């Protein structure tokens, strides 16, 4: 129903959810690329290396949910969440070819924790603003727009990454076409078949292309922080 988005608080919460969703899915999508092409991790290992982000998300979600249920106060999490995300993205945005995993894990933990304390509380805000009979459609609409925004955001982030990476790779002088494919077919196996110097140059090109993604993510997290400050904290009713 159109009336759902004539409510300013619902519109704010939905917009913030879209921004947070973009940051979350972009981070999840492109960090494994870094781990595989820079650190030489396998596909399975690169997924396991995301555990700190998942852990932060789970702990943040459960912890904030418990506190909100006890206190009824949720705005503090909407403000602190983007701050944590900004800190984590700042860590990730400074990663290079020689960055240790502990550094990257710290950044992932902060990003995951920031996302965790925000996501479910954004849904709580929407649910607190609508009549009981619209709870289902309001919740699903919020999740829907977050996923649509995240999908669009990933496409934009991908274009930025590929464009920057292609430029860095061309500047390095590495010829991938002769090795069996261009940037679109780049895999850890392909890199392993290149000369040692070429492998180092590809890793540097990948590492040099990642900061742009996280800088854009910081901009989106900053926008989420500003919008979160406009949220009006309402009493939560027992339903």
Image (tube, rainbow, N blue to C red):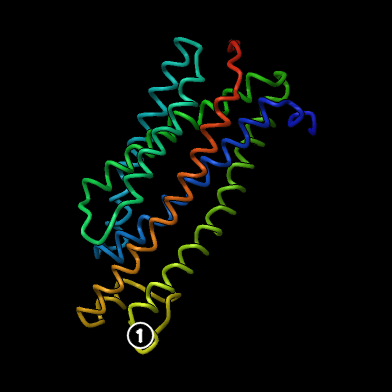
Most foreground residue, 141 or 74: 74
Most foreground residue, 171 or 19: 171
Question: SS at mark 1?
Answer: loop
| In the image, farthest residue toward the front | 171
Most foreground residue, 161 or 187: 161
When the figure is inspected, residue 36 is found, relative to residue 152, above or below; the finding is below
- The residue positioned 47% from the left and 14% from the top of the image is 69
- The residue positioned 51% from the left and 40% from the top of the image is 20
Which percent across, then down, holds residue 142? Answer: 63, 35
Most foreground residue, 190 or 209: 209
Q: Badge 1 local density, few (<14 within 10 Å), some, or many (20+)?
A: some
- The residue positioned 33% from the left and 78% from the top of the image is 172
Which percent across, then down, holds residue 165? Answer: 41, 69
- The residue positioned 36% from the left and 61% from the top of the image is 33
Specify whether 13 is left or right of 84.
right
Which percent across, then down, holds residue 88? Answer: 35, 41
Which residue is identified by label 1?
A: 175
In the rendered image, the quadrant that contains the N terminus is: top right
When the figure is inspected, residue 189 is found, relative to residue 237, above or below; the finding is below
The part of the image, by quadrant, that contains residue 106 is: top left
Which percent across, then down, holds residue 91? Answer: 32, 45
In the rendered image, the quadrant that contains the C terminus is: top right
The part of the image, by quadrant, that contains residue 84 is: top left
């Amino acid at each position: 129903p159109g009336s759902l988005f004539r409510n300013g608080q619902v519109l704010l919460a939905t917009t913030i959810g879209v921004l947070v969703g973009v940051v979350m899915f972009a981070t999840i999508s492109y960090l494994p690329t870094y781990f595989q092409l820079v650190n030489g991790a396998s596909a399975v290992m690169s997924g396991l290396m995301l555990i700190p982000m998942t852990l932060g998300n789970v702990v943040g979600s459960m912890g904030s949910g418990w506190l909100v249920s006890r206190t009824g106060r949720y705005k503090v999490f909407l403000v602190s969440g983007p701050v944590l995300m900004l800190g984590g993205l700042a860590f990730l945005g400074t990663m290079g070819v020689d960055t240790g995993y502990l550094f990257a894990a710290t950044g992932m933990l902060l990003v995951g924790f920031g996302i965790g304390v925000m996501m479910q509380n954004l849904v709580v805000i929407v649910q607190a603003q609508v009549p009981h009979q619209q709870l289902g459609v309001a919740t699903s609409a919020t999740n829907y727009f977050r996923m649509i925004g995240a999908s669009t955001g990933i496409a934009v982030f991908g274009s930025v990454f590929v464009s920057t990476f292609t430029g860095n790779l061309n500047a390095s002088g590495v010829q991938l076409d002769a090795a069996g494919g261009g940037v679109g077919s780049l895999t850890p196996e392909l890199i392993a078949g290149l000369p040692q110097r070429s492998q180092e140059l590809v890793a540097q090109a990948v590492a040099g292309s990642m900061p742009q993604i996280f800088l854009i993510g910081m901009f989106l997290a900053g926008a989420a922080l500003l919008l979160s400050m406009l949220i009006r904290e309402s009493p939560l009713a027992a339903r």
